[in-house]
Image: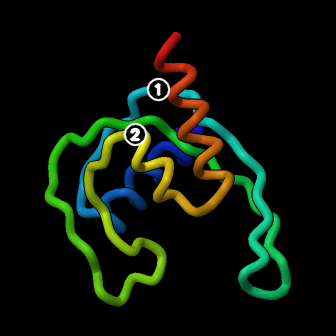
Amino acid sequence: MERRRSAGCFVTREETGYSVEIANPDPITVEAIREDHPPPLHHTIHFFAARVVEGRPRQDPRDDVVSRSGWLPIDRALEEIERPEEKEAVRHFLQVASG
């Protein structure tokens, strides 16, 4: 599991410019099927709640994964998220955070 947490921190830094620390060691794990490129890809995604430690938002114009990064109120963020598995993870974190 430590490798997944480290990978999550690395990918966050690489794709957004933010260094983060994992806030909760237990990920939200969801299964997803990506049909936007053949053949359909079945994969497992591990989402971690994290805190920003340092960094500034940046966007690599060659990046086709992250279209932009920034801070939004949670209700607006849920509207902006396109992938159902990502919405599912955010909703789960909200339930955990609210007790």
Residue 9 position within the rendered picture, expressed as x and y whole percent measured from the top left:
39, 50
Compared to 28, does 44 lie above or below? below
Disc 1 element: loop
Question: Which amino acid is tagged 2?
Answer: Ile
Which picture quadrant has residue 52? top left
Task: Name the residue at 31% across, 59% down.
Answer: 13
Question: Which amino acid is tagged 1?
Answer: Asn
User: Is residue 61 toward the left or the right of residue 79 in the image?
Assistant: left
Q: Which mark is residue 74?
A: 2
| Residue designated by label 1 | 24
Evaluate if marks 2 and 1 touch, with contact meaning CB atoms under 8 Å apart.
Answer: no
Which picture quadrant has residue 88? top right
Task: Name the residue at 59% across, 51% down.
Answer: 86
Which picture quadrant has residue 21? top left
Residue 55 position within the rendered picture, expressed as x and y whole percent measured from the top left:
15, 54
Task: Name the residue at 79% across, 73% down.
Answer: 41
Quadrant of image for the N terminus: top right
**Distance (Cα) linking label 2 and label 1:** 18 Å
Q: Is residue 34 or residue 29 the one in the foreground?
A: 34
* Extreme-top residue of the structure: 99
Compared to 57, does 49 lie above or below? above
Sequence-first disc among 2 and 1: 1
Q: Is residue 3 or residue 61 the one in the foreground?
A: 61
Q: Is residue 44 or residue 87 the one in the foreground?
A: 87
Residue 94 position within the rendered picture, expressed as x and y whole percent measured from the top left:
51, 27
Q: Rate crowding at label 1 as few (under 14), some (14 to 19) or many (20 or more) other CA atoms within 10 Å.
A: few
Disc 2 element: helix
Compared to 9, does 41 lie above or below? below
